[in-house]
Image (spheres, helix red, strand yellow):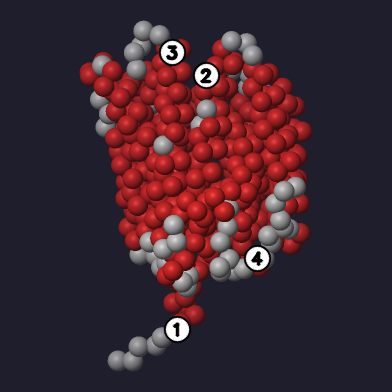
Amino acid sequence: MTTTLNPQRDARATLRKTIVGTGIGNAVEWYDWAIYATFTPFIASQLFSKADPASAVLSTLAIFAVGFVARPFGGFLFGWIGDRIGRKSSMTLAVGLASLGSLLIGIAPTFAAVGVWASVLLLVARLIQGLAHGGELPSSQTYLSEIAPRERRGLWSTLIYTSGTVGILFGTLLGAVLNMSLSTEMMNAWGWRIPFLIGAVMGLYALVMRARMHESSVFEDEPAADKREPIWPQIVRHRKQALQVIGLTVGLTVIYYIWGVVAPSYATTALKIDRGEALWAGVIGNVVFIAALPFWGKLSDRIGRKKVLWAGATGAAVLHFPMTWLLKDSAWQLAVSMSVMLVFIAASAAIVPAVFAELFPTSIRTVGVGVPYSICVAAFGGTAPYLQQWLKDINMAQAFNLYAVALLVISILFIFSIPETKGKDLRG
């Protein structure tokens, strides 16, 4: 029997597996974080004391923020693994650790059963997920940027936020379905655990997929001596690029978490919009976001990264207050405001994976992005939901909006400092 070889078909199959492996792992990580925000009211009622419901919600959001504290450590650890051992190894370990954190939350005993230990276990699980997520994003976006064709890197980089948003969307849809299918008593008793257990299973599947992927040829072709070069001296040498990562991230991370992640939960807890309707509004907003990402990615490959970054950050800054004023007491207002904001947020989200990868050399590309990015997200993105809720509770909601727009202005100013990197060769 004769076996017919088709190198072109085999190459396409390998590429397809690589893209799926990268995307599904990234989706699982984002799904884990999204369902925590979505199911905050249930987590608060089950893993904290019911004596003070408002305090329980704030405590749950505080642990959401604490999880971000582990991200810089994850950025360094998995960044080191990515730059020394390989992008594939870093990505595989990160998704496995995130799956473990999701499993711990899904099986956590209630406050009524074990008291404060329920809250402690939640904290441990969130720290584990924070460590994993700190390494996931820089590893996956570095890997994706390195395997992408140079002339289409902007488009390919949109897979990061596309797959991540699919994870968020799946979590949001699951929340909406559970909210319609189960009574409040059933949700409080066991329904809220379902998304976390599903996340653990999906994480295991992503781990297997990533274990079968090929390493980036850019990393494989790097001289062995460069891979052994000490990390910290390189970080010091590239401190300007690290500062640029922070500057570009600070506005995007806050505005994205406000409108892309916690908006449905905030609308439910602070604005008293029906939970099911708010979740469906979130689905609409995230579908619009996914549709906008490839448009901006393709555009950046044609006109350059900086013009797209300016358009997105400026549009989000100008429209934040009007969309906040629109959002008052109904789900349609939430759907419209989220959709409008996410169109402009998508401009930056679509291409920052490519921009960040193009700022650093191969030997420090993962950790060079991972550490400053994770520090910035921990300090600003992770604290955004808590700060927003707290300022709302003390009747200072406008102060938070000013804060968000001010951070966007900082990001706009930093865009001037970066070189135009469209089409840059990533080898070396």
Q: Quadrant of the C terminus?
A: bottom right
Estimate the spatial distance between the alpha carbons at disc 4 and disc 1, rounded to whole Å. 31 Å
**Which mark sits nearer the N-terminus, 4 or 1?**
1
Tags 2 and 4 touching, CB below 8 Å = no
Image location (x, y in percent) of residue 243: 61, 44
Q: Give the numbered dot on residue 269.
A: 2
Front disc: 1 or 3: 3
**Which mark sits nearer the N-terminus, 1 or 3?**
1
Estimate the spatial distance between the alpha carbons at disc 3 and disc 2, rounded to whole Å. 13 Å
Asked whether residue 291 is in view, the answer is: no
Residue drawn where x is 39% and y is 48% of the image? 77
**Which mark sits nearer the N-terminus, 3 or 2?**
3
**Which mark sits nearer the N-terminus, 1 or 2?**
1
Quickly name the residue at label 1. 6
Q: Is residue 221 above or below residue 137?
A: below
Residue type, label 4: Lys
Residue type, label 2: Thr
Q: Quadrant of residue 333?
A: top right
How many neighbours does mark 3 have within 10 angstroms: few (below 14), some (14-19), or many (20 or more)? some
Q: Give the numbered dot on residue 255.
A: none
Image location (x, y in percent) of residue 101: 33, 38
Tags 4 and 1 touching, CB below 8 Å = no
Residue type, label 1: Asn
Residue drawn where x is 72% and y is 48% of the image? 417
